[in-house]
Amino acid sequence: MESSNNPLSGLWQPAFQLKNLHYGPSCVQNHLLSVLPSQTTSHVFIITTNSIASKTPLLQRLQHLLGTQYAGTFSHISQHAPVAEVDAATEKVMTIAGVSGNTNSTNGDAAPPQNQQLTDTINSTVLLSIGGGSPIDAAKSISHRMHERTGHFLPHITIPTTLSAAECTLGGGYTKSDGTKVGFMNPQMGVTAIFYDPDFARFTPPRLFLSTGIRALDHAVEALYQPYVTEVPWKALSLWAVETLFECLPKARETEMQDAEVLTRCMLAAWSLALTSYPKQTDGETSCITLSPVIALKARTSPSASSQIAKLLPAIESTSTFKTLFAKPQPLASNGETNKEPNSSKSIPLKGHSPSSPAIANGQHSSSTSSTSLTNGTTTATTHIKLDPNLAAALKVSTYISALVETMGLSGTLSERGVNTSEKDIIVERALNGGPSGHSGAPVDEGWKAEVEGLVGRLF
């Protein structure tokens, strides 16, 4: 993808392996068999987690639905798809497909099958992942390894139960024993069919579903200010998806994951957002902590970013969630008319801003004034800074997302998530594009580095 905001121009080149996207109640029951490569010879191997296999009826439903086309299950994929689990699952799949040899090949040299019978067996093997990002990525890794061994990728059907949207990317990966994440991309690794079925998603623990929804919001904001994202369809989809997630995530919590339409809308929103950006090495819990402050930082330090983030404000303010969280009855003036609050895009009180802050240094304010008020006999001074309207709107977006996270019980700190303060420098280094010199090799601006260090410190 190529894109420019000024002048408005871009290029979008569709590159999807996806052939079918079914959504809505009972879509798995009604349509799964129809997307198999063969109605008679396909053999489906399921990749999932132990919790889905042992704590829900979903695996049994699929086994019954597939009947004689069910070939087996690997249900031991845990968070971040550890390599040992991917190795074990790959061995089982290759055995079913009649392939022998090293299951964790990484040399990329494909060894084509030696006979037509083996080719037919491989082509009849289908992967079906069910769950969140870990089983989906594990299935992609298995398909990638099969290609390395035989020259054939396996068809991959998925039933996502979270909003991580791993099903939308052309990449996959696993985690090495030392904790290092290994990723790879190939256009043919994409899934061939997706089923967004609320009858499956409703078994997901609410916190997991909601936190991955905040990660989807993370994708939406990034989509608006990233230079590679085109105006259509992706930025337009981002605006729609933000409105949908702001509306539906709280409802999913309120209805205890039982409202089929709400869950379906959330999943469709996550799908549309994930297609706009490259995969991130973060999870939903991390986005709950970082998204709001990162939005504020981007808005304050980049006029271009703030102008794009500001576009989210009308979408958010149109939702019933916004009206519940922020809209207050306006007092009546003596003439019976509604008193309107001052336009905050022109004059709002700020915390933590100083004349040397990047927002001011970049020319995103016009002037500042001071006012003095008397409260309980104590004089307090309040500084009001007139902001550029785009910056003010973008900061509102940050505030509203923070409130959304809090109202769903997802707020917290990195320390509460088990991240040690000794890792601050590593986080800062990654945030600065891979190191002190960044990707380009040019020195990182010291002022920007200080901003990032301050933000990371406040996350603990």
Image (cartoon, helix red, strand yellow):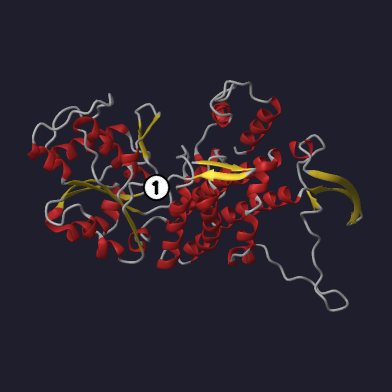
Can I make out residue 230 in this image? yes
255 displayed left or right of 397: left
Between residues 10 and 405, which one lies in front from this camera angle? 10
Query: Where residue 38 sits in the image (x, y, percent)?
Result: 16, 53
9 or 162, which is in the foreground? 9
Q: Quadrant of the C terminus?
A: top right
Find numbered disc 1 in the image and state the secondary structure of the residue it sits on. helix
Q: Is residue 199 above or below residue 70?
A: below
Report the residue at 29% width, 55% height from top: 55
Q: Position of residue 114 (x, y in %)?
A: 10, 31
Residue located 34% across and 28% down the image: 177
Which amino acid is tagged 1? Cys
Q: Is residue 259 visible?
A: no
| Location of mark 1 (residue) | 168
Residue 447 picture location, percent across and down: 71, 28
Residue drawn at (77%, 54%) of the image? 345
